[in-house]
């Protein structure tokens, strides 16, 4: 392959991991990251680009001879950046806005799953003007807990698991009135509570077929033992002992391929990453939700495990050629990512704390930046809730966890917080 200039959109730990993987590609030319972070600066050029301004993005793509644009986060995908670039004959990796509705609208995803018999919990939809009907539905419900969700993107704040009527009514009221949720809750999804172990499966799709990259488990809550507030994610590990090769293939056959076929049938072929949030129930795997991009921090454990050139994979996805490539992932090792956050996160926290002691990367230890910046003196300081991602690789899950925590012991900043039990739920299964 000729060398190719890449524009990567995003600024988190996920994007640092993607930049790292793109940089390793034999066909990478220039790599630009918009806006990037101090970690991605070592891998390419961080550029100041208003990614909501599609014309400005196109101008940059044309001006810098970009042959591939990679979109990290969901919002630009849902906003149609891929459609826009594609309409101007520019190659962009990821789903179109219509296809990204699998993440951007939970009711859309539910209706597709229902129509094409993809296993998921039973559900009911209520538009905003029907919410007295939702109240009546809650009143008559007999199976608890019950799950209430805002339909649209809510940055992890639109889901309520209610153990009884009283809680459900409170959740309904919150969904109705919270100003931060008003855009997302034009529609409400009430669904069956699924019991089991939660696991995420990441597949790459090309509109026609799909290949599983890896399975992972994340740790959403701020506190050890999955307690406290929801966060963007405090850590992840992969692969999981929850799914073996047979169960992954079963998930591909029963969930992923049927979804890819369903989307093609609907005239909205799905290309890009399909992130399947699953519950392993007594009746088998059921879909909790789909996301249309890599997870953060799951991406940070998947990129180091990927042995095939990421540009080759992304190009195959864009051009419908996944059948022609063999994707290899390290199956001999385990990867653990521990997120270091600012004290107070996910509520309010201070910024500008000097960060010290980051160990050098090796072939089994990586530190991916998220909320960091260089201050006026060129010192690295904290600049967000989630600050750094420490990622390790080892032959056993236990060793990889140990190794991540060992590396953390040298890192310091004022108010540094991290969970002490990342991967522990996986260890219990060995
Ligand atoms: N039907 C369900 N049964 C049990 N738990 C659920 C269900 N739906 C969601 N959850 C829990 O709530 C979390 C968030 O829900 P999800 O649909 O993934 O929304 P989002 O990630 O957009 O906030 C899930 O990761 C899961 O732990
Ligand atoms: Mg989710």
Image: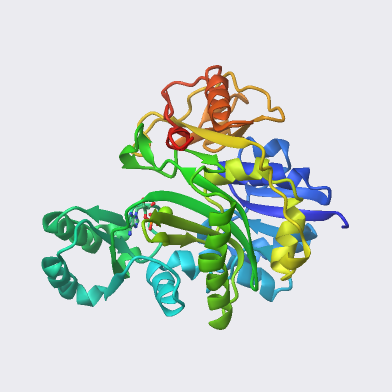
Vertical comparison of 372 with 315: above or below: above
Depth check: 215 or 112 in front? 215
Among the 4 quarters of the image, the one containing residue 20: top right
Residue 78 visible in the current orientation: yes
Residue at 82 percent across and 50 percent down: it is: 29
Q: Can residue 97 be seen in this view?
A: no
Residue 127: x and y in percent read 27, 75
List x then y, in percent, for residue 326: 76, 57
Left or right: where 89 falls relative to 127: right
Q: Choose between 62 and 295: the one closer to the eye.
A: 295
Q: In this view, does 314 lie above or below 21?
A: below
Q: Name the colouring of the figure.
A: rainbow
321 relative to 385, above or below:
below
- Total label count? 0
Residue 209 horizontal side relative to residue 26, left or right: left
Q: Quadrant of the N terminus?
A: bottom right
Residue at image location 57% in from the left, 55% down from the top = 246
Instruction: Locate residue 406, reporting x and y percent.
Output: 55, 20
Tell me: 259 left or right of 281: right
Q: Residue sitting at 52 percent across and 22 percent down?
A: 354
Instruction: Pinpoint residue 370: horizontal percent, then vertical percent.
Output: 54, 38
Image-based side of 29 in relation to 182, left or right = right
Query: Residue 64 lies in what quarter of the image?
Result: bottom right
- Which residue is at the far right? 2
**Ligand 1 is located in which of the four quadrants?**
bottom left
> In front here: 36 or 93?
93
């Amino acid at each position: 392959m000729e060398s190719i200039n890449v524009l990567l959109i995003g600024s988190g730990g996920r994007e640092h991991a993607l930049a790292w993987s793109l940089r390793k590609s034999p066909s990478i030319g220039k790599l630009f990251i918009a806006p990037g972070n101090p970690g991605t600066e070592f891998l390419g050029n961080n550029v100041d680009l208003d990614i909501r301004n599609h014309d400005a993005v196109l101008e940059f793509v044309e001006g810098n001879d970009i042959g591939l644009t990679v979109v990290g986060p969901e919002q630009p995908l849902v906003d149609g950046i891929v459609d826009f670039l594609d309409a101007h004959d520019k190659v962009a990796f990821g789903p179109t806005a219509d296809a990204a509705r699998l993440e951007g609208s939970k009711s859309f995803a539910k209706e597709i799953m229902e129509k094409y018999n993809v296993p998921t919990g039973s559900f009911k939809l209520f538009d905003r003007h029907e919410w007295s009907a939702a109240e009546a539905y809650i009143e008559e419900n007999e199976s608890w807990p019950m799950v209430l969700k805002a339909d649209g993107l809510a940055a992890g704040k639109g889901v309520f698991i209610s153990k009884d009527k009283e809680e459900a009514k409170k959740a309904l009221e919150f969904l109705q009135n919270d100003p931060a949720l008003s855009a997302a809750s034009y529609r409400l999804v009430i669904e069956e509570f699924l019991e089991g172990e939660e696991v995420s499966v990441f597949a790459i799709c090309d509109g026609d077929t799909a290949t599983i990259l890896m399975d992972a488990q994340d740790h959403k809550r701020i506190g050890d033992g999955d307690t406290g507030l929801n966060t963007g994610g405090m850590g992840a590990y992969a692969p999981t002992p929850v799914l073996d090769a047979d169960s992954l293939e079963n998930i591909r056959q029963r969930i992923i391929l049927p979804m890819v076929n369903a989307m093609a049938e609907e005239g909205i072929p799905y290309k890009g990453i399909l992130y399947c949030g699953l519950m392993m129930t007594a009746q088998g795997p059921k879909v909790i939700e789909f996301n249309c991009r890599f997870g953060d921090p799951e991406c940070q454990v998947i990129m180091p495990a990927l042995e095939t050139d990421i540009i080759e994979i992304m190009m195959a996805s864009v051009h419908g050629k996944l059948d022609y490539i063999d994707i290899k992932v390290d199956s001999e090792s385990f990867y653990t990512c521990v997120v270091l956050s600012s004290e107070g996160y996910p509520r309010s926290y201070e910024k500008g704390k000097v960060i010290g002691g980051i160990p050098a990367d090796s072939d089994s230890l990586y530190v991916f930046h998220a909320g960091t910046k260089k201050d006026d003196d060129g010192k690295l300081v904290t600049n967000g809730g989630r600050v750094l991602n420490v990622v390790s690789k080892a032959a056993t899950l236990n060793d990889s966890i140990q190794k991540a925590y060992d590396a953390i012991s040298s890192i310091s900043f004022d108010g540094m917080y991290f969970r002490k039990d990342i991967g522990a739920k996986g260890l219990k299964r060995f």
